[in-house]
Structures are given as C-alpha cells and as structure tokens.
Image (cartoon, rainbow, N blue to C red):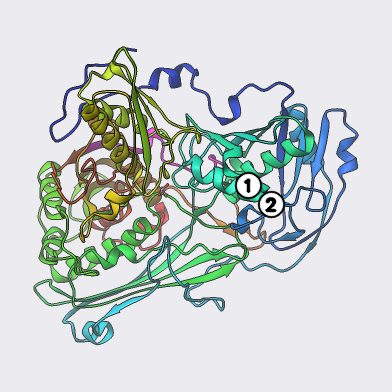
Amino acid sequence: MSAPVFRRPAAAGPPQPREESVEKVTGAARYAYEYPQQEAAYAWIVTSPIAKGRVLTVDADHVLRSDDVIAVLRHDNAPRLEDVGDPALAVLQDPAVAYRGQVVALVVAKTPEAAREAAATLPVEYEELGHDVVLTPDHESLYQPDAVNPDYPADTEQGDPDGAFEASPVRVDHTYRTVALHNNPMEPHATTALWHDDGSLTLYDSNQGGHVVRQTIAGLFGLAPDRVRVMNPHVGGGFGSKGTPRPNVVLAAMAAQVTGRPVKIAVTRQQMFSLVGYRTPTIQRVRLGAEADGRLNSITHEVVEQTSTVKEFAEQTAVATRSMYAAPHRRTSHRLARLDVPVPSWMRAPGECPGFFAFESALDELAAELGMDPIDLRVRNEPETDPESGKPFSSRNLVACLRQGAERFGWEPRPRAPRTRRDGRWLIGTGVASSYYPTYEAPATATVSADENGHHTVAINATDIGTGARTALHQLAAEALDVPWADVTVRIGDSDLPQAGLAGGSMGTRSWGWAVTKACRALREQGGGSVTANTAEDIKALGEYSRAAYGAQFVEVRVNQDTGELRVPRMTGVFAAGRIVNSRTARSQFIGGMTMGLSMALHEEGVMDAAFGDYANHDLASYHVAACADVGTMDIAWIEEDDEHLGGTGTKGIGEIGIVGTAAAVANAVYDATGVRVRDLPIHLEDLL
Ligand code: MOS
C-alpha cells in the first residue's frame, strides 16, 4: 500500500484513503468473531417469544443429549453478576420477561451449527402476561424524565409561548410522527471471550469504545479493570448501537467462564432488532407563531416517545430546537411512555435527527403559510447568540450553508404553488432543511514515541468504526510531528493503550485528535523520546461559547402521479463543521449520513405488531435500508471554517450532522412536488395518491 507524503493541509486535509482499506477488502482485517481460538465453543442466544411474563422452565436436558452441546445457561444457573449498573445487561439473572426478544437462555456448543440447532429446539415454558406495546400521545404511563440524553433538562420554557402563539398573525400547529428505527451496522454485535489461568479476561468485542466495555465488564464480573482487556481494531459500524456494551459481551464472558473454553458469540441480524437498542418512535407537536414578515414569536416543540420497563432511555428529541432560531417565547418538553418493549437507545444523531424532521418540516409549512421562501424564513430568524444559553457562537455558518447550497443545487426561490413542475407523469419537487449537531469532546490520553530511526508510534485506545478515524489520526500526527506519512504508525483499538472515549457523539476524531496532536507537538519540542499527553485540562479551559456544526440539505424528488413511486435523483449537502481533516473520508461520512436520512424518510420502518408485542420486521428483507439503487447523485460541500474557540485541532465533528435535516428536506420536497404534506415517516406510496 503506498500513501502520498503528508503535506500540511490548508482548510481541508488531503483525500487520504483509509490506511486499512486493503486489509478490509482482502479479508485480512480481523473482526471480533474471527480471532482463531483453540477449542473454541460457540454460543447461541435464545430469545423470548412473549412480550411480558416469566420463564417457568428451560428443559436443558433435551438438548444436552447431543454430544456437541456443552452447556445451557439459564436464569437459574448462569453466573451471578455483580454491580449491575445497566439493567439491560443483567442477562439471565431472573426469570422475568420484559419484552419480546429478551435473552432467556444461552446454548453453548462445539460448533455454531450445533448451537443454533439446540437453541431452536430448546423447550422453554413461560407464564404469559398481557403486554402494552403501542405508543399513543396520551398513554397513561406518560411521565416527565429527570433529564434527557445525555443530561439536558427535559423541559424548558421562556416567556409566554402559548399567549405569543395565539397572538401571532401567522401560525402552524401540527403533529409529526417518526417510527422505531433499528441500527443495522454491517457487522452485527459479536464477541470472542477468553479467560486466562491468572483470572484475567480478554474480549475481542465489536464496540464503539473499548474503555467503557472494560469498565462495565470488570464491574459485572468483580474484576479490577486492568484484568480485562478489550480489543477492537476493526469494527464494522455501530451507529450508536455499539456505544455501550450489549448482552453479547456479558454472555460471552459468562459462557467462557462456565465452560472453561474460549467462547464466540454473534448476535444474529434478527436478534439485532431487540438486543442492541433502536431509535425510539416519537409523536411531536410543533407550534410556530410568526409575524407576517416571518419573524418567529413563539416556538413550542412537545415530544412524546417510548422507553422500556427495563431501563429508561429518554431521547433528547426537542433539545436541538432550543438552540436553532431566535424567538422570544419558547417551550420544549419530553414525555415518556414505559412500554413492554426492547430498550431504545442511541442511533445516529439521537434527538436531533427525529426532532429536526418535525421542526424543519414545520418551518417549511410556515414558509408556505407566509408565502415566503423557506431559506429567507430561516435567515430572518438567525439569532445573534445561542437562543437557549445566551452564549456567543464559536462560529455559526448556517446562513452560508443555506446560501452556498442554494447556489450549488440551483434552488428556485419561493413562493410557488406546489404540484406545478412535472416531466410527463412525474411530478418534480425540491425541498430544503437545516442541520445542526452540537460539538462534544471527551478527555483522552495519547502516547507518542520516536525510535532511533525516526519512526514514530502513536498509541491511543481510539475506535475506528469504519469512519476513517485511524487515518485521520495518522494525518494529524504526521502534521503535528511534521514528518512524512510513512514515518508514523498509529495503534488503536486495544484497552491496554492510553485511555480514550467513545466513537460516538461525533466527537471521536475531535477528542482523540486533540490528544494525539498535543502529544506529537510536545514530542517535537522535546526532540525525541516519548511523550504522553492528556486533554482534560485543555477541555476545561474551553471558553464559554455555543459550539455546534451546521448544515443545509437540498433534495429533489420525482413522484409518479399514477403509482406514487418516489425517486430522489439528487441531494446537496453543505456543512460547516470546523476543520475537515480528511476530505475523502469526511465526504463519505456526509454521504453516509444523508443516505441514512433518505432511508429514514422513505424506507426504514419498525412495524409494531400489537398482538405479538414486537416489531414484526426482523431482517433486512422486511426492514429495508436504502440500497445503492435508492440513492441518486450526492453533491457534498463544506464551508471553510477556522474557529479559534474549538480548541485542539479545530474540528467540530461530522459523523452525525449528515443525517439531521435530511428527512425533512425529503418531505418538504415531496410537498413541493405533490401538494401532499406527509407528517408521519416513512413516506409511503399510498400517502401520495
Ligand atoms: Mo452516535 S448515535 O453518538 O454513536
């Protein structure tokens, strides 16, 4: 593999290919399930077919007759876990069943085939209770959570939002719904677990952060954290579902302990739909009151969403609305229904993504009501400072994204009546929406050392979930050291390396790159040897600014007026996300986010079957994720942003903002094409006929 000599980047870094790309496409890159082990055993998860009740009996003898079956773990014989902070990880600890698809047993066998066969035939008897799985806007269990993810207030209010709404000459008041969306990274969750004679544990685990897995597993098994080593040099995607440890890693460690063998476990694609989190469905009422010139008087965004009985997850659906546009009177709220459903969790831009579908759709409805161009409406409500915190923006280039996007896309200013452009039987429409994603960072430690030949090794327990993070860190290290690309090796994905936070919240490269750059700069000053740097104090010293990435999404749709068939021939996304380290992988991240947003708008739908108490579609045949044939031309650009208040490497984060706003832009384009306003995602053909 040859790589160009690193040059100090200007605004955007060079289009460096992923350094592990050849390993990946040749199959040399190892994933969690693929580490060869002597005498490996294979575990298969057995899940509950009932949504609520309890396990009465598990007839293990029935399957233990097979010579290939080694063990069956149940609630009454599985190792007891210590210190269960996350109730979703308390697997096989009691007979209660809280949702369909919950783990009720684990079969361990000499081959995966034998394990699968035994799991399929294992007799389990249940006592079944009635379940409640359907989210309604007035569900009797609705409550206000103490906070929403990760720690925002559930409710906010400024001024008199109801009075100001009523007094506004132009108003929209609509309810939008999003469905459950299921994280489906290419690589399902998987673990290979291996206990050593000295009582330590090695886990090859597919996750978005080995440090949190180490801490959690150490706690569950009563070990000192340094007795657990978590390796994840290659991870095949996560989208948030691998941000926290999942039952597979606990079960693998348990099974390896019980059998005395290395154990491999992979969550099946079908099991992914209940065991790894999903995007909660939402019901969102948005009210906007404006003056005739488009100035917003009142914004209210009230959210109802679901959580589980096992564990609370409160998505921050309306939080981004707080910081987006100026308006003196404002309210946001979140209410949760506790249902007998799997535990919802993070999925790419949890909160911002479904929230902006509703909010940015409502703005489009307001623009139509006002007879105003939707870009002008957004520009008119551009705030001077963060409307929620009052803090100055470190940089905010939303208007530049909208303007540059309009130019690139060929946006025709409004007003114009919907359903006025066509090409034969195809109705043509265009839509726009804004994007926003907060800039987060977490402390990290990196070590860099130089050997006598001038070769540098950077070590940090970062995680590359397929984004190109490893390559970006390599670029940042070479830049800070001012040495050629080939003189740097980057080691990541091993919990024995210096501590680093999650590949999540779009903060991986920002957080790790900061530590890497700091260590490399210090080493350069020192003139060799080895340096370890930590960023905790630097992060504390960040100024009081509102830091976020912004973007604008433009979409063209074509709708067949006879069949309702909907095509998206082209999309444009323009982003302002601080410094872009690697123009090639950054572009891929934006394309990926926008593709996922398109998928949310048109395809992905967890369909709840109220009778069975579960999402009825459990695989990629019945749960369609946008494929290449669904995606047209993607035009991606970014604003050159040199933001001195970001600290570190001047990056904001790009993993999530691409999805935010995309679904609204699609729905807004569908309205322009057809005159039909679809407020419930996904958009179905029959909505348009
Ligand atoms: Mo992302 S949902 O923060 O992994």
| Residue under the image location 59 percent in, 57 percent down | 86
Where's the N terminus, which quadrant?
A: top left
What is the span of residues highlighted in magenta in the rendered image?
617-635
Quadrant in the picture for residue 118: top right
- Residue 3 in view of the camera: yes
Give the camera-side residue of 63 and 608. Answer: 63
Q: In this view, does 552 lie to the left or right of 113?
A: left
Give the camera-side residue of 437 and 458. Answer: 458
- Please give the residue where the numbered disc 1 appears in the rendered image: 247
Q: Which amino acid does label 1 sit on?
A: Pro
- Residue 590 in view of the camera: no
* Element under disc 2: loop
The vertical placement of 571 against 386, above or below, is: above
How busy is the neighbourhood of tag 1: few (under 14 within 10 Å), some, or many (20 plus)?
A: many
- Please give the residue where the numbered disc 2 appears in the rendered image: 91
Report how far apart the C-alphas of labels 2 and 1 lie in the structure: 7 Å
In x, y percent, where is residue 621? Answer: 54, 40
